[in-house]
Amino acid sequence: MTPDDARPRPEPGSFRDPQTRIFLAGGEVLRGLGPRAAQDWKALRDSDFFAAAQADGSVTATEEVERELPGEPGTWTATLRHAPLPFVTYPYEWSHAMLQDAAALHLDLLQRALAAGFTMKDGSAYNVQWRGAARPEFIDVGSFEPARPGEPWAGYRQFCQTLLYPLMLQAHLDLDPRPLLRAQIDGITPGQMRRMLGGTKRLAPGVLKHVHLHDSMQNRNAATSTGAVRAQLRDAGFTDELVAAAARAMAKLVAKLDWRPPATHWGDYRETCSYTDADAAAKAAFVDAALAAAPAKDLVLDLGANDGAFSRQAARAGAYVVAVEADAAVVDTLYRRLKAEGERRILPIVMDLADPSPGGGWAGVERSGFAARAAAADVTLALALVHHLAIGRNVPLPAIVDWFAGMGRHLVVEFVHPDDPMARRLLANKPDGLFPDYHVETFVRLLGERFDIARRETLPGGTRTLLAGVRRA
Amino acid sequence: MPTHLAYLDAGSGSLIVQALVAGTAGVVVAAKLYWRRLTSIFRRRTPVATTAAQRQAQPEATSTTAAADKD
């Protein structure tokens, strides 16, 4: 670690609340608290509620430390240190069940906070992160503050826009909300939702109140300040019990917004893969040997993870694995299984690797692009992936190799030969001779320019070659 | 009551919807809020005690009342 790494630098996605800011210093995650936030923290720190949320892991492990942070003197009154996350993900990378669990966690914490005399300043999906499928975690300790009597929850709109609405789109319309979430950092607006959920969909759970009424109320009260409305609500007898009742009602609604992925998806993969048992065994042994040879496995990316078989293999080898898969239904099923198993070393996410998450928000850096996050990986697994990118999406082989070189130092990659049934199926949709360079020797040569190839093995079936390499310098 | 320092614009309409989400007791609060808004128009007009004809004759007073009504 260089001294530059150790100097705290502001995390670009944490500027919205001026009273608190995240700084990264080496491997540490620090949080600066302004004078007011420091007061709130003192109250929170001493509460039974916070102790319980720390003990059960629902709020990121946090301790107070003595550290200087950048900023004008007096900006930061106190500094906290959070347990670092193995890999940061965003709501547009989560499956439906993940989004549902994130929403449930948020509301559960809100209810527990309210019961203890606290509230939350916001209601954003981005406040939730994961340590494996079994551990969603609320990371924004700066969100808790002592509740003021008769005050509604300030985070309700944000909760709707980043959690409730995406769940509704998937549950009520079977519409993938990820493109909208990815495009709009503040989430989907009531106005957008209203246009999508007209007709009889108005009667679907939660739609009339949270969407239609919400949009009307926003339009009608656009000229009234939130301060005025807060005062009017207080005068009309709004109480803390009503905030709690609203949180309970939303929690019930979230639990109802189920989405079952089409049954046909799961199981297709193993069958459609052109593996024989001998191929499968040889492949597993190759991956095991390659993983054993990698000295660090703090972060393994399993690109094109499908049902997560190789993610599991890597996790057994001691890795923390991010299983990246484009099919949201497959990820959802995998997530549910891993969660049921209590898996904390594998996190499945939804992403099309030919169109990975870009940077987003302010200056394009408030949310980090996938490439920037993937650069921290120790090992990249790319099994049965290259042909999908090269043939399916026309990505040139040199570009694929460059892309690999930007990720884990160790790479385990499978090259499916053009005469393999899977490759033939993809090639059948493209004109003959479109990919003259798609050949194992071309790929090995290109890979050799960026990686020292440590192992090479062609599976017994003869149509798939596995390669393990270590990136040069 | 301390000055409100929430960094997030909670949305005026969103705050009222929250009452409605809370169930019957919340609906009562929202109804009361709207009733008070409605009656406040008359409450504020009572001391002025002007007729429509008088207001037409006093354009300045009309604009003042309208501004107050907007809240």
Image: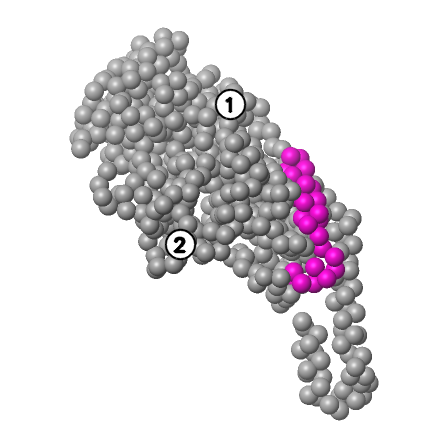
Q: Is residue A463 magenta?
A: no
Residue designated by label 2? A76
Q: Quadrant of the C terminus of chain A?
A: top left
Question: Where residue A40 appears, x then y in whole percent?
Answer: 52, 50
Residue drawn at (49%, 44%) of the image: A141
Q: Residue furthest front?
A: A46
Identify the element where label 2 is drawn.
loop
| Residue at (50, 37) in percent of width and height | A59
Q: Is residue A65 left or right of residue B51?
A: left
Say whether residue A402 is left or right of residue A217.
Answer: left
Residue found 61% across the figure and 40% down from its top = A112
Q: Is residue A442 visible?
A: no
User: Residue A214 or A418: which is nearer the viewer?
Assistant: A214
Tell me where the magenta segment starts and ends, as one range. Answer: A229-256
| Label 2 crowd (10 A; few <14 / some 14-19 / many >=20) | many
- Chain letter for mark 2: A
Reading the chain from its start, which is encountered first: label 1 or label 2? Answer: 2
Same chain letter for marks 1 and 2: yes
The Cα atoms of the two marked residues, 1 and 2, are separated by 38 Å
> Where is mark 1, residue-wise?
A342
What amino acid is at disc 1?
A: Gly
Question: Residue A419: image x %, image y %?
Answer: 32, 19
Residue B68 place in picture, x, y as percent: 69, 76
The kind of residue on which mark 2 rests is Trp
Query: Which quadrant, please, contains the N terminus of chain A?
Result: top left
